[in-house]
Amino acid sequence: MTTPFRFAYLHGFASSSKSYKGVQLAKAFRQHGVTLELPDMNQPSFSKLTYSGALSVMDQRHAEAPDKRWRLIGSSMGGCIATRWAQLNPDAVDRLLLLCPGFDLPSRWMMLLGEEAFERWQLTGSHLFEIGETRAPLWWKFIEDAKTHPPIPSASCETLIIHGRADEVVPLESSLQYVHHHDNASLIEVDSDHGLVSALPEITAQALALFEIA
């Protein structure tokens, strides 16, 4: 399939280019002759990850073929990164599919960790995360850098959000509020949790439809 667009899946926090959802979506895209790129957002490493560093991954990818526009899928933190990159590069992004997008990163982490652990992270300069297969420290600069970006980025392109009703990491209300304030955004609620694995067949169908892949 010849297309004027490039496609990429931006994984979430403590995930990687081997993300299950990303790999499965890439497989579905390949069946239609389309490449779904799976960049590693943990640059230069998870321990030294920053919001700006993740954005630079897309900057580098786009520089390879600046004449092509992007259709992006972003999961959790990847959804926030995708939206921010689209905000910074409105002419480079055509459509967004956001999966339980993790907007307002600093405030979200304070709620998830609790005030005491969050303050300890700041005092010590590092916090050990144990999520899935990831067990590694992350420096406090991750939070400091995230605060230099809008907590809720605003993209002007067509945006579809898929959010699980049972999401305990990023409440559904976050996406409800986003679509309420953005006429270019729509929301599909699914009976799933933050991982959205059980909703993967619907996500795949919606991605192919949104990105006009037949």
Image (spheres, rainbow, N blue to C red):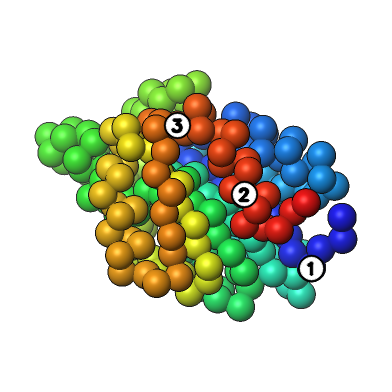
SS type, badge 2: helix
Residue assigned mark 1: 4
First in sequence: mark 3 vs mark 2? 3
> What residue do we see at 39% from left, 44% from top?
189
Q: In the drawing, what numbered circle is on residue 207?
A: 2
> What residue do we see at 78% from left, 51% from top?
214
Separation of disc 3 and disc 2 at Cα? 16 Å
Judged by depth in the image, the label closer to the viewer, 2 or 1, is 2
* Residue sitting at the far left: 116
Q: Nearer the viewer, residue 87 or 136?
A: 87
Separation of disc 2 and disc 1 at Cα? 17 Å
> What residue do we see at 67% from left, 34% from top?
23
Is residue 203 in view?
yes
First in sequence: mark 2 vs mark 1? 1
Residue assigned mark 3: 195
Q: Viewed as shown, does residue 199 lie left or right of 205? A: left
Label 2 Cα neighbours within 10 Å, binned few <14 / some 14-19 / many ≥20: many
Image spot of residue 155 (x, y percent): 46, 70
